[in-house]
Image (cartoon, rainbow, N blue to C red):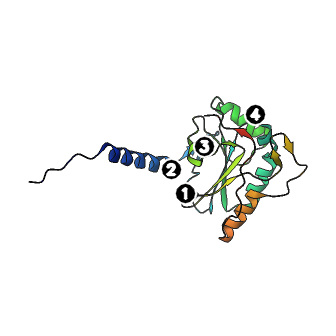
């Protein structure tokens, strides 16, 4: 007769953590603010998903809306999403903002910052590109319009997200992933 010792608490904790991460990493569907199911981590038929973390009161975020819309229109092989991080924002407020600013990508509410934590996003606007295999391919700024908080260039000189998406489609490594400049995502 063989006597088995009970598994250690550390081993049980590790198994539980793995199960939780597996579940969080691939939610089945998330509804956008209009109630449509979205699949940001299962971009069927696409090269990947671009999540842009956003806060409606951040003037930097709002100034990037035309560029976000241009990138979405140009890179049709990627699924684009805006992820609103304000914990107090309602769907009605978000729908009004979508209409007012003409946001083209689906807007997802992330009041508890689950998506932000999963993507390790820390500021808005920060772009995180997930590959078809759910790995992070790029995390950083959209471009260098903002050299730092309060310092805006007349026009971007480096288009980091555009360059990263081009590199991904070409199967090349992404050379530079500069950090985003913007409003902090508060825990």
- Quarter occupied by residue 164: bottom right
Could you tell me which residue is drawn at 71 percent across and 50 percent down? 179
What residue would you read off at disc 4? 57
> Upstream in the sequence, badge 4 or badge 1?
4
Q: Is residue 137 left or right of residue 98?
A: left
Q: Badge 1 is on which residue?
A: 134
Q: Which mark is residue 25?
A: 2
Q: Residues within 10 Å of mark 3 (few under 14, many from 20)?
A: many
- How busy is the neighbourhood of tag 4: few (under 14 within 10 Å), some, or many (20 plus)? few
User: Mark 1: which secondary structure?
Assistant: loop
Q: Position of residue 185 (x, y in %)?
A: 66, 37
Is tag 3's residue or tag 4's residue first in the polypeptide sequence?
4
- What residue would you read off at disc 3? 116
Q: Is residue 157 visible?
A: yes
Label 2, label 1: how far apart the Cα atoms are: 8 Å
For the C terminus, the image quarter is top right
Q: Position of residue 1 (x, y in %)?
A: 8, 54
Badge 1: residue crowd in 10 Å (few <14, some 14–19, many ≥20): some
Which quadrant of the view contains residue 93?
top right
The residue lying furthest to the top in this view is 88
């Amino acid at each position: 007769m063989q006597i088995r010792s009970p598994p250690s608490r550390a081993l049980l904790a590790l198994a539980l953590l793995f199960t939780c991460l597996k579940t969080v990493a691939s939610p089945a569907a998330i509804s956008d603010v209009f109630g449509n199911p979205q699949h940001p981590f299962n971009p069927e038929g696409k090269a990947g998903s671009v999540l842009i973390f956003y806060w409606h009161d951040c003037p930097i975020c709002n100034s990037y809306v035309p560029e976000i819309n241009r990138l979405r229109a140009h890179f049709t092989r990627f699924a684009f999403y805006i992820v609103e991080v304000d914990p107090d924002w309602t769907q009605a407020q978000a729908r009004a903002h979508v209409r007012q600013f003409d946001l083209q990508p689906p807007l997802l509410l992330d009041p508890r910052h689950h998506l932000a934590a999963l993507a390790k996003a820390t500021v808005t606007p920060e772009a995180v590109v997930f590959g078809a295999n759910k790995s992070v391919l790029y995390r950083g700024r959209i471009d260098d319009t903002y050299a730092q908080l309060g310092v805006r260039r007349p026009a971007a000189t480096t288009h980091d997200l555009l360059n990263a998406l081009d590199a991904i489609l070409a199967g090349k490594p992404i050379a530079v992933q500069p950090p985003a400049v913007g409003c902090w995502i508060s825990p």
